[in-house]
Each structure stands twice: as C-alpha cells, then as structure tokens.
Amino acid sequence: MVELRDIMIIARQESQQMRHHFIGVEHLCIAMLRARDSILARTLSERGLSVPYVIEALRRRVGKGGRHRLWAGVPNTPRVNVVLTIAQELAAEAGRQNITEHDLLIAILDEGDSLALRVLTTLNIDLEELRRDILNADALPAVQAAYVHIELLPTLDVTLSPEVLFLLRQMFSDYDRVRVEDRLAGGHSGALLLLVTPIRDGSEHASLVVKIGPADLILDEAQRFERYIKTTLPPMTARIEERPVSPPLTELVGIKYTLASDGQSAPRSLRTIVQSEPLDGFAQWLRSALYHTYAPRWWAQRRPFRFEAWQEYDALLPPVLEIDYLPHPPADAIHIRYPIRRQRLTQIHYGQTVQIENFIVHRIDRAAHSITLSLGHGSTRALQITVRDLDLESEAYFRGELVESIAGRVVRTRHDSLMAGLAELTPDFDPRDARLILDQKRIPNPFTQYQPVLDHTVTGSISVVHGDLHLGNIMLGVNNTAMLIDFGQSREGHTLFDWAVLEMSLLAELSLPYLDNTWDSARRAAAELLELTPPIIVDPIRLELLVEVRHIVAELLANPKRRDEYWVALAVVALRASLWTTMSVPQRRLMVYVAGVAIGELIDHGAAPDATEFSGLTG
Amino acid sequence: MTEPLQVQIMVMSGVDDGTLHTFDARYDGQPLNDSWTLTIGRRDDNDLCLRGDVFVSRQHANLIWRGAQWYLQDIHSTNGTFIENHNDLFADERVSGTVPLCAGQLFRIGRTWLRLQPLE
C-alpha cells in the first residue's frame, strides 16, 4: 500500500520539474500514477487509458510555471489542504495512523471539484465507477497479464524485445495465442508496425495491425485519429478501435488498427504487392479503390488554401538549427522569435549563440537528451530547432508546451545536415555544384537550390490529409478494398501532399529493379520514370501507376493551369526522402533527381501559368 | 432589475487553487448604471489580483455584467485569455475581444484557471 509520505516525495519532484513550486491536486494525482503498484495506475490501465497519456493530459491542463519563484518553500494549495483533511478523517475512521493512497483517492473524489478530476472526466472516466473500483481495490489483481503465447512466423526476420512482448501480451490478454505474420515498414518514426492474428480456443480471429512506439508518439497519433480521421473514414476500412494500451511504468504504448477483413486471407500492403506481384490493373485500382473511397471526405473537399510553402513544408526538411543548451546565454545572443525573418535564419552559422522565444515543444527525445521546438501549433510547425544536451530528468518538457525562452550554441545548421546527407550519396559528383545533369538537361541541385521552393507562395486547397501516404501504409483487404493505417501525421493540410508522398514512394519502389550502385542507373531510371525520355528499360505497366497518380493530381489542382502547386510538394518530399537512411543509397540518389526536376519545373514555369503538358506524365 | 449584488470567482489552478473570491457591486469594481465591471490582472489595483502567475499581464482581462449576462473581455494580454473546450483538452478557445460567459464555465487567465460560481 502506497503511503502519503511516498506520494508527497514524488509530488514535490513533479512540482519542481514543472516549475510550479506548490503542491496541487494534479501533483498528487501524477505522483500516484508514477508510484509503483499504485491503485490509480492500475484502475486507469484497466480502462485502457495509458499512464503517460493521463500524465500528459494533466500537465497540459495546468501548464508549466515561469522562470521566477514568487514565494518560498513548496506550499500546499487550499484545495490540497481540504483534500488532506478529508483523507485524515478517512484514515482515522479506518483506524489507520497514516494516510494511504486509498484515503487520498477517495478524498480527492469527495472534494470533487479539482481540475484533475475534470481531466479524468474529459477522458471518459466515470468517477462513480472509479470510486467503486478504488473501494474494491484490494480485490483487484496486480497488473499481470494472462500468459499469451506470441509466435513469430519462421520466415519472419524479426526479434521482439521483452518489453514489446510484454506489451503484446497485455494488448491481447483475452486471447490464448498471437501469431505475428509480418513486420510492416514503419517509415521513419521508429515505431514498430506488426501484422498479427490473435487466436482464441483454436480459432483464428481477424488479423489486425499493431503499432508500438514511444508514448508521446503513439498518444499523439491516437489524438490525431480522434480529431481528423475518425469522423471522415469510409465504413469499410482500418480504424483505431480502442484506446492506447500501456502497462504502467513503461515508455512504450501500443494501439490496434482493426482491419475490415473476412478472417480468411491476411491483408497485404501495397508495398509488398509492388515488390512481388505483376501490377496489371493496379493503376485503375489506385483510382477506383484508393482515390474514390477516401476523396469525398478528404482530398476532394477542396477548400481554398493560399500559403507560403515554408509554412507547410519547412518542417519536412532537417531542423533549421541544432543547438547545445546554454543555461546562461551571453547578452549578444541572436534572438529568434515571431515574426521571423527567415533570411536571417539562413545566415546563422556554427558556434553562434541564439535565444529562442515562444516556440512550441514538438518532439521529445529522451535517449538523445534533446527536444525539438517549432513555430506554432498543429500543422504549422515550421522552423524546427533541436535543442540538445538538456537534463530532462530535472526539468519536464511535454508536447505542445510553449517555451518562453531557451538558449544554446549552434552546432549544426540545415545546410550542414543537408551536406552530410549528400555526402552519404557521393562519390561521383561535387555537392557544391549548383546544377546536375539529367538527360542532357541541366537541373538544379536540390541540396543547394531548395530555397526558392520554400519562398514560393502557393494557391492550393486544404483538406484532411493522411500525412504519410507511402505504399507501406496502404493495405489491401477483402475484395481488394483500400485500407489506410498509421495516422501519426494526419492533419488538415495541403491536399496534394499525400499524392506527392505516394508518387515518391512509387518511384522508390518501382525503380528498384533498374538501380545498381551507380549514379548512372539512378539518372536513367529517373529520366524514364519521370517520362523525360521514352521507356527502354522500364516496364510500361509500372509507368501506368505513376501516370494515374499524375492524372489524379491534375484533377486536384486548385487551378488546373498552376502546376507549381504540385511541384512544391514533390520537390520537398523527394528532397526529404533523399536524406532517409531507411532508403537504399541508389533510391536516395534517384530522389535527388526527382527533387531536382521538380525544382527545375517550379523555377521555369512556377511564376506564370503555362499551357504545356503536365510533364510527360499526362499520358 | 436582475443586477446581482454579489458574484463569486473560484480559483481552479495554481498556488491559490481552491480560493473563493467574493465581490459585491456596492464595494468592488466599477458599477455604471445597470452594468458592472471587475478587472483581473497581476497588479495590486485589480479587483481580482493574481500575483502568483507570471503569465498574467498587469491588466489582463475584465469581467463585465451587462443586460443580465456576464461577459469576459481580454484587454490585449500577452499570454491570452482562454475558455475551456470540453471536447478537446488540448485546444482551449482563445478569447479575442469580448465573449459571453456562463456561470460554471472555466476560463483561463495566463496559466490560472478560474470559474464564475453559479449563483445559489
């Protein structure tokens, strides 16, 4: 049984980390959630609410304190004193000398008016049920999932960590066995995506996709799903059915995507199909199954959206700056705050000190002791700056938090990151060259010539977008329905972004048979796949898929004469892909050319509408 | 005349969480004909002074009683005035200008949550 003394110690730590310097009901609740074997963690977990999620919700609700301490000591709030009085009475009635977690929880429920309880209510916790469970808490089993066998298909080259196995057992505690069928390519997020079939009493249930990753990543995905996707999905598709699951005291959280399925054949990803099967008819499938299923509530919404490219796309490129944290910045530090002169940012170089004001915490990387800040909330999360060398133990940061001021010394600029990425693709050309040669034409070197793309003003449309529509996230289910998974980047944003990602992903996969270890092969494949030259080595059926994507894009353009809307998206998406270490070097080289071609089109034709065909790819 | 003689504001977060402030039109704020204005801010001369929150501006917001209805007015505060969004914990609604406020509704001045108490 956890006692008040232990709860208070953790509550003080929490208050310190949040720079609050007082003890409120929210600190008591977070302390109880963090305490080992606590009733609160157990009862909330049983309702499918993960501990990190509830902690984050509580922290966000109250926000973080300022730099300056305005009073001495760590006083209790008046509300906490009321709660403690009630708890003391409860303990005395039960003949206990000391207040326990049990008394404290009932006292918080009796007091009944704290923000912490409002947060639980908003998370759909029934407080009366919670009270019953707490009163019966001694009868509750310790957190110990029934033993579920996890089998891996022998053909599968995957090892699962004990933590992941533990989480899987908890997620499928109603089943006897779980068979892991496949590991789906998880893109760049570092999360694990598994296709699994749960089995109970010898009968196999419908396969589903499980995503396991760090808490803040998965919880963010669950929130995005609630906010943008849930209400706009067609009926027969993949969806997140349950709340995220995490055992108390782990950093990992898992969610399930249930797939519409007949329980007979396991769904396959479009990436698997493109890699291994003949592709006849798939161009048609892209339109009829994928586009027509999702377009009415998503891409075809076509609300006008005029934006500067950097606002929407800057976040896809490496951080504009990486800095090492300085607790006491010198007086001559360069201030970075809204409104931003982006020109100025590109002139900052290694070794200078900067002071960043009013940026939002976008990502927290505990392993790397770093956080990434960006300008603005939600989808406008442009101008990312990574702050390294932070002591995340003594000071809490949480996603979405506004950081009033933080300073550091520049250790890496975007230009450095891009050049480092390009260096992995050499030898064979000089990265400082302003232009590359493709099919006897000169095209811009995207690594040095991307700035005009970000400066471009786009007249486009906004809609719900999937946010990461690569082939691995498109699944084929019963009757070849299109099912999308992985809503970790879903948002309202530039409509054509999804299609640029799909084209990039198609190019990367379709080119594979034609790529060897030379720049020449990448050059040739790019020229043929982008239809700058007639196909000689490339199978025309493969081209049909790309042509279909461009047809759909042409229909989605806000102004059919203004293709720059698409070139902006494709240029940034391809440039980003050329830096991905999860992609092979030959594929990354291909992406350099794709980005170069897109930037070239933008510079040549971007400013004014032109009547030429939409590259060769209009068929 | 439905003019309330008294109004109570409950502090819902921060170091003073749980404190109830009672205001009376006869002694507090600026009564004017049938309207009544209470000021909120960090400086001592506000009717409701929030000393413990550095995110509160010196003069941050006004609570206005007019035509039998309470209104919340943000006066160009640095860190904003917000109203609780029941559907989304992470998206409080920022107040710009003057908006109606119901008793029982939570609103946030800087980082401090407050509530207009329902009248008995």
Image (cartoon, rainbow, N blue to C red):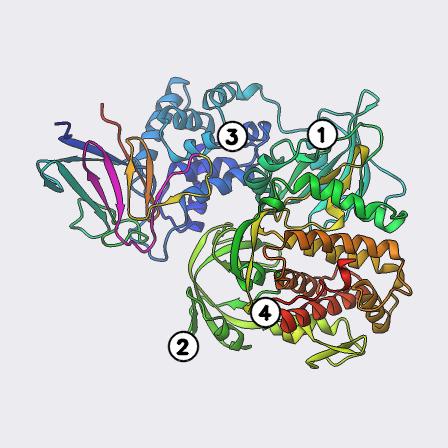
Q: Residue at x 72, y 35 (%)?
A: A168
* Chain of residue at mark 4: A
Determine which quarter of the picture holds residue A293: top right
Q: Which residue is mark 3?
A: A40
Say which of marks 4 and 3 sits in front: 4
Q: Is there one chain holding both mark 4 and mark 3?
A: yes
**Which is more N-terminal, label 4 or label 2?**
2
Residue beneath disc 1: A172
Which residue is denoted by mark 4 in the rendering?
A608
In the rendered image of this protein, does residue A485 appear above or below residue B59? above
Assess whether mark 4 and mark 2 are in contact (beta carbons under 8 angstroms): no
Which amino acid lies under the numbered mark 3 shown in the image of this protein? Leu
Circle 2 sits in a helix, a strand or a loop, which is it?
Answer: loop
Mark positioned earlier in the residue sequence (2 or 3): 3
Q: Do residues under tags 4 and 3 come within 8 Å of each other at their CB atoms?
A: no
**Badge 2 and badge 1 in a common chain:** yes
Q: CA distance from mark 1 to mark 4?
A: 57 Å
Which numbered dot is residue B52?
A: none
Residue bearing mark 2: A332
Say if mark 2 contacts mark 1, CB within 8 Å. no
Q: Position of residue A62 (x, y in %)?
A: 40, 43
